[in-house]
Structure formats: C-alpha cells, structure tokens
Amino acid sequence: MDTLSVTLVSALTSGVISMGLVWLTSRQQRRDSIRTQRETQNISYLNPLRWHTAEAHHRLSLYATSVDRHGFYQPAQVLSEPQEVDGKSTAWFAGRGVALVSSIWMTSCLFAQMTRTRHDIPFLRLPGKDDTRLSALILKVHVAFAACDVYYATQSSIGTDVILEPEGRLRSYREFCDFLSQPDRRVWADPLIWFHLAIANGERRPNLQRALDALQELSGFLDGSLAGGSSLRARWDAEL
C-alpha cells in the first residue's frame, strides 16, 4: 500500500473514531441531563413530603409518648371543642395554644404535600414499581387518618387550603392561625382539630398508633428513594 493510501485510510479511520467518540459523548451527556432532570424533579416533590412526614410523625409521637406515660398530653389540652378557636387572640395562638395548633398545622402541611405528590406522581420518574409503591403508602396514611374520622375528602380539602396559589408555597404557622380564625373556613379543619383533642386526652390510642406506623413506613420509603439517612431518627436527634 502506497503512502497516499495509508494516509487516506488513517484519516478515514481517525474520522470514524472521532465521530464515534462525539456520538458516544453526546449520548452520555443526554443521559446525564435526563438523569439530572429526573433527580431534580423527584427531589422537588419527594423532599418536601419526606420533611413533612418526619415533622408530623415527630409531633404525633410526642402525644403518644406522653399518653403512654401520663395518660394525656397536657400541652395540647387547651380546648374542649373546635368552636372555641373562634375569637382567640394572636397571643393565644403564639402562646397557650401553640402546642395544639402547631400540631394541627404540621399535619395539614403533610396533607398538602401528599395531595400535591399524589396529583403529580405521573410526572415523577421512579425506579421499577416505586411509583405504585409510593401511591400505596400515601393512601395508607390517608386511610389511617380516615379511621380517625378525618375523612379522605376532608384531608384533601385541608391540604389544598394550606397551599397558597399562585406561588405554590404552604401557609406559615401564622397564616394558618389566621385561616383558623375564620369560622367558615375553620370548619373544614374541625375533624382534624377533634382528632388532636382526642389524642391529647388519651383517647383513640390505637388509631394514633396506626397513623404513626403508616407515617413511619412512608418515611422509610422516601429515605430510600432519596438515598438519605433516617429522617425520623434525624428529627429526634435534632431535639437533643
């Protein structure tokens, strides 16, 4: 083979290799971009749900622990019925009523995140059948609270009321207190208030445990999906 032929073959080979490398690099970059988008999208939905699951579980665990030790949770024994919220001052919400109302707020925020995630599960990209598993675990939490007479439709309504549009953020505790101060709007949260009053008085302990178990299972799934540590343990450690 003469020198010209060798040069042409070398140039052709080099060109094919270069084109192949460009194609492989471009393909890998597309895969990385899709994976990054998927991870970002998953985190934007699942991280808030994970955080609020841990918060709700932690607060309800305080009720359960106190009831097991003393038969009641005294900090939340500040009302006899939801209607007594009407006319409460800002000082009451920030003081004597904070243990009860902040617990109701945390659970309401959980409902909001579950409602948001359930609606947008089709847009998530989870491995295998994890999307089905996530739906089942969210439903399990819904069913646990429904057994406490906080029915599914009520949970969704409370969750929707907590989400502020168009910004899409959740109400702060102060904004939630303003919401409860309106009797015609507070009435939708009455079943959740009744539930917290009942468990504060040591009632419905099996229902409370069922809710805690469902939250723990959901939390474990979210920890695994986000490759994080135990969010429930981290929440308790934060109090130490």
Image (tube, helix red, strand yellow):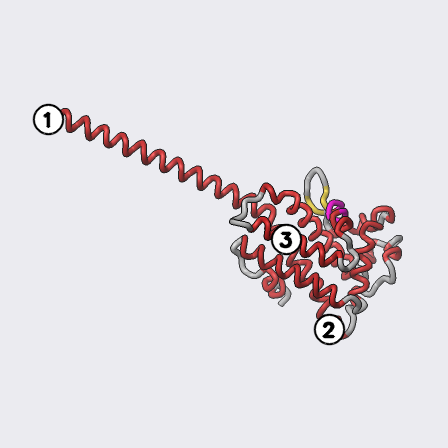
The residue that mark 1 highlights is 2
Is residue 94 visible in the rendered image? The answer is no
Image coords of residue 14 (percent x, y):
24, 32
For image coordinates 15% across by 26% down, the residue present is: 5
**Secondary structure found at label 2:** helix
Identify residue type, mark 3.
Ala
Q: Is residue 10 left or right of residue 146?
A: left
Image coords of residue 182 (percent x, y):
85, 47
Identify residue type, mark 2.
Asp
- The quarter in which the N terminus is drawn is top left
* Contact check, label 1 and label 3, Cβ < 8 Å: no
* Contact check, label 3 and label 2, Cβ < 8 Å: no
Q: Is residue 159 magenta?
A: yes
Q: Is residue 211 left or right of residue 79?
A: left
Identify residue type, mark 1.
Asp
**Secondary structure found at label 1:** loop
Q: In terms of sequence position, does the residue under pointer 1 or pointer 3 come before the other?
A: 1
Given residues 173 and 201, the one toward you in this image is 201
Q: In terms of sequence position, does the residue under pointer 3 or pointer 2 come before the other?
A: 2
For image coordinates 80% across by 48% down, the residue present is: 179
Q: How many marks?
A: 3
The residue that mark 2 highlights is 68
Q: Is residue 203 above or below residue 46?
A: below
Query: In this picture, which residue range is highlighted in magenta?
Result: 157-161
